[in-house]
Amino acid sequence: MQQQLEMPSPQPPERSRFSFALTLAAAAVLIVVAGLYFLPGRQSPSRGTAPEVHFGAAEQAYAPKLQIENIALSRAENFLHQEVTTLSGELVNTGDHSLRAVELTIEFSDDLHQVVLRETRSVLAAGAAPLAPAEHRSFEVSFEHIPSPWNMQQPVIRITGLLLISSKD
């Protein structure tokens, strides 16, 4: 009697199933990404961005006519239990031009008057109405992390960018 070994019939390789599943997943991801990209109502990259500010000779000459008043600092905890420092104030345009954008540089110092944090922020929203002559506009800037050496004093605030509206605009 001769013993025969039975060989199992060849099964389709698992690799072809894996390749099919991978192809199907990749196609689904592409469809979702394409759907989000072409979704109606999507904003174009140029819309909603802050206008480009300048600080050439004309803007530097106009900067003293823009005053920052009623500066206040407050601290609060956000929903992630992080302390947030908020700087609020009011811009006053004492000049004769309207402004489309204002950029401020805010510097927090330590006890030795060395800068521990310097941030530049736009304080007029991109879609907001221009700041007309003799007009006041409130602003608020939040900082999620100010380094611990900060001396807890009011930061230095400088105007470092303006976008003037010319009389022909």
Image: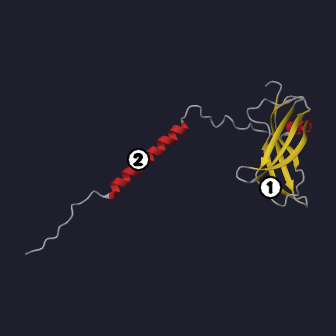
| Disc on res. 154 | none
The type of residue carrying mark 2 is Leu
Q: Where is residue 103 in the image (x, y as percent from the top left)?
A: 81, 41
The type of residue carrying mark 1 is Ile
Mark 2 element type: helix
Q: In which quarter of the image is residue 116?
A: bottom right
Vertical comparison of 24 with 14: above or below: above
Q: In which quarter of the image is residue 44?
A: top right
Outermost residue, bottom side: 1
Mark 1 element type: loop
Q: Where is residue 4 in the image (x, y as percent from the top left)?
A: 13, 71
| Disc on res. 24 | 2
Q: Distance between the residues labelled 2 and 1?
A: 47 Å
Q: Where is residue 20 in the image (x, y as percent from the top left)?
A: 37, 50
Q: For this rendering, which residue is in front, 80 or 28?
A: 80
**Callout 2 crowding tier (Cα within 10 Å): few <14, some 14–19, many ≥20:** few
Q: Which residue bears the numbered disc 1?
A: 146
Left or right for 5, reference 138: left
Q: Residue at x 88, y 30 (%)?
A: 135
Q: Residue at x 55, y 38 (%)?
A: 37
Query: Which image quadrant: the C terminus?
Result: top right
**Callout 1 crowding tier (Cα within 10 Å): few <14, some 14–19, many ≥20:** some
Q: Where is residue 165 in the image (x, y as percent from the top left)?
A: 81, 30
- Which colour scheme appears in the figure? secondary structure
Q: For this rendering, which residue is in front, 109 or 63?
A: 109
Q: Mark 2 and mark 1 in contact? Answer it, CB < 8 Å.
A: no
Query: Which image quadrant: the N terminus?
Result: bottom left
Q: Which of marks 1 and 2 precedes in the sequence? A: 2
Q: For this rendering, which residue is in front, 88 or 80?
A: 80
